[in-house]
Amino acid sequence: MGLCEIKSAAAHKFALTVIAMFLTTAYVTADVNPKNQKNTDIPSLVSIVDSPGFEAFKLTLSHIVKERNPGADKLQHFYVARYPENSVITYMFWQEMKLLWIMSPGGLDEESWLGVRYPSGGQLIDLQNGVVSTVDEVGSSSYLVTKDWAARRLFETLIKGDLIIVNQ
Amino acid sequence: MAKFTGTGNHNVTLKEIELPKTESKRLHLVDVKARVATDIKLTFGSNIKASIKRVPFDGSKGIWVVDIKGRNDGKTTLTAQFGNEVATVDIKVFTKTMIILPLESTQHGMLTRLFLAESINPGNSLLYNEKESKMSMIWMRQVIENRLKHKTPYIFGAKKPSGQGKYTIYDIVKAKNQFHGFEDYPKTFSVIKVNITGFVTIANDYNHPKRKLYADFIENAKMAASESALNGFFDESLKGLYGWRTKGASAPGGSFKEYKSLAGQTFYTLK
């Protein structure tokens, strides 16, 4: 079992800005919309780091690295978006593999995180091959996503989320 | 009070155990302050073998090691007695069934893998519901059949090899950009292969707490992939089911119209 460190995503913001800049444009544009600024009903968000099942989650990340990037010889960076307390869905970005999860947080035991370890085809998005420019290009696909959608998820994970570093 | 527990957690009393024939399991007998192992009397049926280690696991806490092995199918009760202290656990011995997938070279094998790869699996504790998952696989099968029967399957990315008269299920499943990792089937994308291998491993691991859930998940996918999967099923969407997206993902394009959400997926019909 490797070492897992937790740091604020903000600490890595600068290094990752180059990656995020291209994809976050659309979200930043939407975020300054006056209509959004007036919304006071935004629910408070919780961090995966405060989840009672965080230790089991870290073990799951170690398994993910072993199974999907065997022999990884450098630190692996996972960013998890904050989510409304009762939400069954949040998002996770694995920087080294450029993979994005639509994930459901688990509980105290490792088995409850198996859905993150083994996501369905639509829950795991390959940002190098699964992102297209327009909704028309998504068409009838069960897994492609638009650039705007991916940009919002990257903003929530990379910029506003929590970073978990896995050292195998 | 004397009790049987697992070897990891001495606070949870084991009431019943399922033990595959010919396999062994180690238990702990807890809170039995015997001086020597021979003072503890074990009784059990002929379908298991049980023995207590001579040296205690932790003498001061009265924890002893008991090994059991399944011999024949059937039920029995293992009893450990020391004076007035009695601990019991019910044991069911059964013949292990290997869960395997249909050959990947067959249509049944391809569809089974597709439904396993695309469905929300039992590892998603907050999203998974076995009954709904089973039905969502049937809906997925209906989507495949509807795309095949559509007058222009090419709008779903399907391509017929030159010289082939009609579209086949293979053309639908392997259509460009439709189902994650299936374009080059049977050369399945490695991300998907990791998942499917994981499901089968868990389904065959009789010590895994979610073994049965995964075994049933695989059986449901096999059933939805079978020839008779849609017998008795009626597609209630007005224009038929034509696609699905994972809940939380972006919307589809084309002429899709949302129909219903089921088992962590949103299903679509046509406008």
Image (spheres, coloured by chain):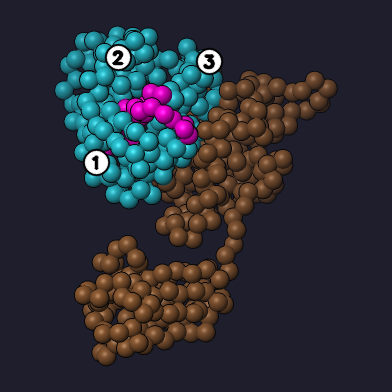
Chain colours: A cyan, B brown
**CB of mark 2 within 8 Å of CB of mark 1?**
no
Q: Nearer the viewer, mark 3 or mark 2?
A: 2
Are tags 3 and 2 found on a single chain?
yes
Callout 3 secondary element: helix
Find disc 1 in the rendering and name its residue. A51
Q: Quadrant of the N terminus of chain B?
A: bottom left
Crowding near the residue tagged with mark 2, few <14, some 14–19, many ≥20 C-alpha atoms within 10 Å: few
Give, as a single range, the part of the protein colored magenta.
Answer: A69-96
Sequence-earlier tag: 2 or 1: 2
**CB of mark 1 within 8 Å of CB of mark 3?**
no
Task: Identify the mark at residue A137; answer none if there is no mark.
Answer: 3
Are tags 1 and 3 found on a single chain?
yes
A32 to the left or right of B113: left
> Does residue B262 appear in this view?
no
Find disc 2 in the rendering and name its residue. A15
B190 to the left or right of B161: left
Percent position (x, y) of residue B77?
42, 81
